Image (tube, rainbow, N blue to C red):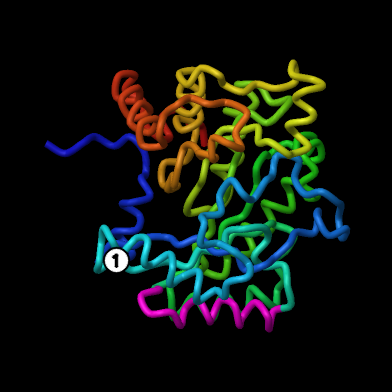
Amino acid sequence: MSQPFLYNDFSQFLKKHFPFKVQKISLNAGFTCPNRDGTKGKGGCTYCNNQTFNPDYCKTEKTITQQLEEGKQFFARKYPDMKYLAYFQAYTNTYQEVEELKKKYEEALAVPGVVGLVIGTRPDCMSDELLDYLEQLNKTTFLLVEYGVESTSDITLKRINRGHTFNESKQAIERTASRGILTGAHIILGLPGEEHDEIVEQAHLISQLPIATLKIHQLQLIRGTKMAHEYELLPQDFKLFHEVDEYINLVIDYVEHLRGDIVIERFISQSPRNLLIAPDWGLKNFEITARIQKRMKEKEAYQGKKLKI
């Protein structure tokens, strides 16, 4: 008996695109962000510390090829026949001259075993010239462009120093998807000032965007960030889901209000414990995902159940 539909799973999405196992390899290609270098601001997003998601092989002193080869060695121990997606993850991976971007993307695609690109970026850093190039590239390789939306509230976006509005996210996603490029979004649940009902309402707005994939994760307080300092001063402004069940209930409510065809790539993120202040649930990602699945079955919940078109 097949498992009933709960939500659109990312592994099934990959199976539809590839007849073999595929793994993303994160890259740090030496980019920065416009809210770091002074173009739009200084200091970057208040919650951001890129050490939280850069593997050991992700070092800017290494070439893209070197990072990919080391990543391949790491994953090939378990699956020798694995293929790979080059994941331009750290900072804003479209924030450079187009010719320089082409060199980096094409260097990644030239590495044996790399079968596509995933490019993480900001909605205010996608030029028409770059979209022209990506539209052509999309005809010859797998391509997914992921935009950091983070929140649909402009008040929140200003507070966390994103440097762009939700409307800019909407426009960038629409421009990209209109070129036939798979487009994804990233959302953080529990940003300061946002309560349960407001967060769930975001799912309706996200559902109106032409996205193929969505990454969801909890707000994490990371050592050395501006937000960690804000928490010390105003802890009452933060909802950190110290109890994992509270976060699970929010995720399920959110997913029930989310368009059914959107692929959910993840529900949580896990930062290194030496950097993490809170919430620290002492659980692995797969354990929390299993709890979400179990609770959804118990509640007879499924993606899109409560979405009102």
At horizontal 26% and vertical 58% (from top left) the residue drawn is 78
Q: Is residue 153 visible?
A: yes
Question: Residue 116 versus residue 61: which sits nearer the camera?
Answer: 61
Q: Name the residue tied to disc 1.
A: 82
Question: Residue 49 versus residue 266: which sits nearer the camera?
Answer: 49
Mark 1, Cα crowd under 10 Å, few <14 / some 14-19 / many 20+, is: some
Q: Which amino acid, mark 1?
A: Met
Q: Is residue 48 magenta?
A: no
At horizontal 31% and vertical 52% (from top left) the residue drawn is 12
At horizontal 25% and vertical 68% (from top left) the residue drawn is 81
Q: How many marks?
A: 1
Residue 292 x/y as whole percent? 38, 28
Residue 163 x/y as whole percent? 80, 49
Q: What are the residue bounds of the magenta stretch?
A: 98-114
Instruction: List the single residue furthest toward the left.
Output: 1
Q: Is residue 290 above or below residue 215?
A: above
